[in-house]
Each structure stands twice: as structure tokens, then as C-alpha cells.
Amino acid sequence: MNIANFMTIIGFVVCTVVILILLVVGSYLFTIDKRQKQHPILRNYPLIGRVRYFLENIGPELRQYLFHNNREGEPFSRNDYQHIVKKAKYKRDVLGYGSQRDFDEPGYYIRNSLFPKLTEELKMDRKTKVTTERYLLLNEPLFAQRKERLDKDESPVYLLEDDDAIVIGEQTRHPFKVKGQIGMSAMSYGSLGERAITALSEGLGIAKGTWMNTGEGGISDYHLKGGVDIIMQIGPGLFGVRDKEGNFSWDALLEKSNMAEVKAFEIKLAQGAKTRGGHIDAEKVTEEIARIRMVEPYKSIDSPNRFREFSDLPSLFKFLEKIREHTGKPVGMKVVVGSSQEADELAKAIKDTGMGPDFITIDGGEGGTGASYQELADSVGLPIRSALPLVDNALRKYGVRDNLKIIASGKMFSPDRIAIALAMGADLVNVARAFMITVGCIQALQCQSNSCPVGVATTDPDLQKGLVIEEKKWRTANYLITMRKGLFRLAAAAGLDSPTKFTREHIVYRDEKGRTWSLDDIYQAMVRPKDINDIS
């Protein structure tokens, strides 16, 4: 028998075996589908019905990569995502041909000046420089992987001058001086894995002049890796500052305040995406996380939706005052705003009591989270561009705005969004999900499952192997430096020598009819509801 005949026989046998296996498996699945009682489509269309569930499972990926256009998709469109990645990878973000923004849609715009500032006229720290590693794109063929290499790049870090530095808690024993207006929003170790937290900490440390909010999960060794300034957040669960019985521990608080990296404390009253309090699934609560939070390992954690230590504004302020006195460091509060009445009550209480926070973090309802409930994430709490002016107005109305700083949070992933927030009354801004993207997040929407495929929002050691700290830390640094550069560029376009000088007059709103309104017009409408129809 020659080799050709021999191969023909083998091929025939193999094909026959494969067909028999497929018939057996198909018959088995057919029987299972016909007998199951859960899915009518499988009972009526065995086997074929399984195609529906397969397509349903891969639907998010199909929409993200094939069917959504560049401006569609939430929480971040493909354009949004790519702009973040380009800043992080290449330390630049330019586009060709023209904007893809829909200029017929209503929205905010930054007023340009007839006489913009020259680069040499900008008030920024020109002495501080840093060397990072960025990618250089060498070739991008259609059917092969793009060719690029890492290259060292030295650049200014685009920090504020010392005279423009923002000081939080000027009256405290240890004020917090900030020379960059962009910092990392609260993201706990546990919600993110140790590699993600470490890469973020080291990247922020490289970029200088910023801060890292620990989230309510307490301070881990990974937050401290990069030597970046820390704002320790304290949530209703009191993680990191509680005793074994779950009560607030002033000794634990003092221990944390003695850390050189800890510059301030933040009391979390609420979060935009989950005003109910925090949650972390049992599989994420490793022994290390349990030790840091002082809870039992491998049991899900639900922090209460409010503190037991206070129940109204006066008792809250006394609690803040005690923390400030105990630590000597600034203390702030993180809030979600629901109405102008709520903002007014807060500002009035600060005025009447003569007490209050050193800073207020306003978290917009569009903010992200590791795990929440749809009804809370979608419908509870105002988005940042509605909430921010309400608080700023109220604080000015009662004459207490100069006593504290405002940090705005809620999809602050681009310089123009930040500039608009600064004009609306913010002194500083927090960024969360964009920083996650710099360390590899692909918006797989699996944060709540501990199965993040890129090793960011997971404590699974195997999945975390995909995240290389030594590469991702440069992306975090590059993104932040490029964002600050863009903010100075916008200030120059508006005729300002520093982004600290953005005010209401530098922003206009264009409605759906093409009419433009100043922020003051809009704010007056907020104060006098009967005028709202005049500018709608």
C-alpha cells in the first residue's frame, strides 16, 4: 500500500470518528435541551437555540469593536478610550482632519482669547523635569502587529508655580500643599489588585505634584510603593481605623497620620455610583485585605450607607474637628449632591457652627465603581456639572467659600472637561477610571466579578500576571503629565497664564437652538427657577 492510500484511509477514519463524536454530543445536547424547563427557546429549537446565548454572551465585545461608532459606547466611547491610551502610551494626543464632536448638540465651550498667552508667559514650574518611557510608533501595518519601541523622554512635569500652589487646610498644623490640580480618585486595594495599585502609585510618584486617594479600603503597602502623597479615605465601614469589634479607633487613626505619605483624611459620606455604601465580593477578600481592613477573610463586605458616629451636620463637623485636632492634618468630606436645598443646608451649617471640612469632594452621579446596583448608579445623585455649581454657589452665598477647597470628580478624563470643572468652581479634580485605563483596563465591565481579564480590578494572582508594573507605571505618569500640559494649553488659549485662573466667565453654554449663555446666566436660573424657561 502506497503512502497516498494510507493517508486517505487515515483521513477517512479521522473524519468518521469526528462525525460520530459530533453526532453523539449533538444527540446528547439535543436531549438535554428538550428536557430542560428553564429556557423555552432551547426546548423549541434544540442546539440552534444555543447560538442565541453564545451571541448574547459576546454581544458587548461585538458592539465595542465592530458595531459602535467612535463616539458611541458607555461609560467611555472608543474615542474617549483611545485619547486616554494615546496620552499614556505616546505622551501625546493629536488628531487629524477635524473634531468628531457633534456641534449641533448642546454643550459647554471654553472661550478663546483674541490674544492668547505665549508659552513663555505661562506661570508654571519650569525647573522640575522628569524622564519617563514612552512608545514611539515605527510602523502600523494593516494585517500585522504594529511596530513600536519604548524610548526615554524628558519633559517638564507641568506643575504650578509655588505662588499658585493650592493649599488644603491652611490653618492646620500640617497643611497639604498641591502643585498639580489632578489627582487619583478613591480606589481601594481589594477593588483593584496589588499590581494595579502599585503601578498607579509608582506612576503618580514619577509624575510628582499629585495625590492618591486610598478609597475606603484602608492604606496598603502598595499605595505607599511610589512615595506619592496620600489622602486616606475613611468610609462608614471604618476600614483601617477600627478595632476588632468594628468601632472607630483613635489610636489606629493616629498611627496612619504619622505616616509621612499621608497628607489628609477624607470622610466618605457617599459616592456617586453607589450612595448605599461600599461592597466587595467574598472572593476578593484575601487574608491580606482582611488584615488591612480588620475583617474576616473570604467573606463579602458591605459597609453601611452612613456613619454611626454622627447623624447630622453639627455632629459631623464635630467629628471632623476631632480628627483634625487629633492628627494635625486636613480633613475633608466626600459627598453626592441631590439638590440646591442640600447644598444650601451644608453651607449654612458651616457658617452657623463656625466649623466644617478643609475640603469637599463632590462626586458626580456619573462616577464609576467596582460594584453597585443599577438603580443607584443610574438615578441617585446629580452629575458633576449640575452638582458642582450648586455647592460653589451655596458656599459663596454664605461667605464660606474661601475657607475650604473643592475637589470635583466624575469622568474628568480630558483637559477640557477639567477646565470646565475648574471654571464651575472646583480647585482640584479627581480621576479614577482613566487611570485604570492607563494600567490596562479595557472596559470589560467585570469589576464586580473578580475576573477582570487584564488583571486590574481583581485580586486573582493568575489574572494579575498580565499586568506588568514596570511597563504600566510609565503610562500612568505619561497620562498625568500630558493632561497637565493640555490644561496649561487651554489656559493659554483662554488668555490665562495659569489654569488656576479659570472662572465662570471663561465658559459658555450653547443650547440646542444655537444660543449661548454664560455660566452666570445658568446659575441665576438655578437660583430663580421661574427663569429656567428663558434659557432652555
Image (spheres, rainbow, N blue to C red):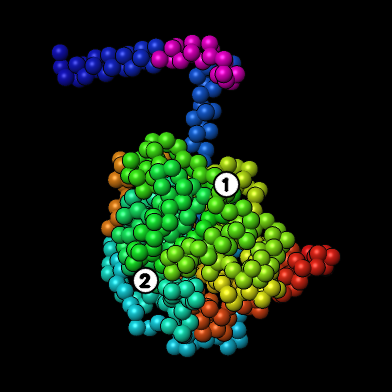
Q: Answer with left or right where residue 265 lies relative to residue 71.
A: left
x 36%, y 59%: residue: 255
- Find residue 285 and report its horizontal and vertical position in percent: 39, 40
Q: Amino acid at mark 1?
A: Asn
- The magenta region covers 25-43
For label 2, the crowd category at 10 Å Cα-Cα, with few meaning under 14, some 14 to 19 and many 20 or more, is many
Residue hosting label 2: 208
Label 2: state its secondary structure: loop
Residue hosting label 1: 305
- Find residue 296 and report its horizontal and vertical position in percent: 39, 38
Question: The N terminus lies in which quarter of the figure?
Answer: top left
- Find residue 74 and report its horizontal and vertical position in percent: 56, 50
Q: Say if 489 sits above or below 188 in the image.
A: below
> In the depicted view, which residue is nearer to us: 203 or 214?
214
Label 1: state its secondary structure: loop
Q: CA distance from mark 1 to mark 2?
A: 34 Å
x 74%, y 63%: residue: 512
